[in-house]
Image: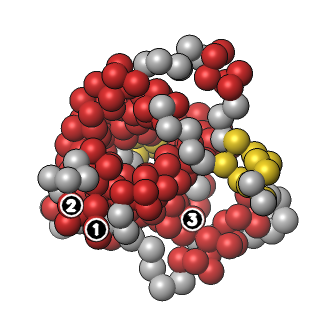
Amino acid sequence: MKEIKEKHALLMRWTHWVNFPVLTVMIWSGLFIYWANDAYGISIFSFTLIKFFPEWFYKYFHIPHRLAEGMAFHFLFMWFFFINGLLYIAYTLFSGAWRELVPKRNSFKEAWQVLLHDLHIRKTTPPQKKYNAAQRIAYSAIILMGAGSVITGLAIYKPVQLYWLCWLCGGYHFARIIHFALTIGYVLFFVIHILQVALAGWNNFRSVVSGFEVIETEPQIREEKTLTANNAENETNGSK
């Protein structure tokens, strides 16, 4: 027997789906800005081993000479990203949903068990409620990353007017490094998140779209419910 169970609230789903295209536009426009000062890579003794974005990458995606366009899109969608994140944080705080998201004392230990289970090394299913330990850590981390992106982004955007914020971020150059590293973190999170959704199956994906999931009721639970209902009905009839 199948039952429909409510899983995700409307505001949670709304902010989740809005965040994806907004972040995509911000990362894409960020590439236009980064092209103008392509400073990062891995070098040894002035010999560049790895450059994050080679010249062919920029040419293939028509990125060069689009700095002004990139800045316009980036600074516009920054506000959508900020407001959407603020809505999500406000919802989790006022609804009490933060209790299901914040990692617990044993979450890091259980997250290791989740990883081993996902890699098919460990057969025993780790503890799973609405979110497992690995999801608690990942979803809490992504909120902190979002806050970090806004703070470092503002420090880079207005380093003179917001000199105190720039100073708190370790200076302009260090703020830019953090901002860049957080962007790489988003991309890695997206890849892992999409893989996890694919592995979790259609039911999990459907719950983030509709807010409900279909669960299979255990036969024993169904029998207990039926027995309880019959006893209640007999008691009602006997009292008449």
Q: Are marks 3 and 1 in contact (CB under 8 Å)?
A: no
- According to the image, label 2 marks what residue? 163
Mark 1: which amino acid?
Trp
The residue drawn where x is 21% and y is 61% is 163
Percent from the top left, x then y, of residue 119?
79, 58
Percent from the top left, x then y, of residue 217?
54, 51
**Residue 63 sits above or below residue 227 on the image:** above
Mark 2: which amino acid?
Tyr
- Tag 1, which secondary structure? helix
**Residue 225 sits above or below residue 31 on the image:** below
Name the mark nearer the viewer: 2 or 3.
2
- According to the image, label 1 marks what residue? 167
Mark 3: which amino acid?
Ala
- According to the image, label 3 marks what residue? 134
The residue drawn where x is 36% and y is 37% is 19
Q: Earlier in the sequence, mark 3 or mark 1?
A: 3
The residue drawn where x is 33% and y is 29% is 71
Q: Report the residue that reaches farthest toward the bottom.
A: 105
Q: Earlier in the sequence, mark 2 or mark 3?
A: 3
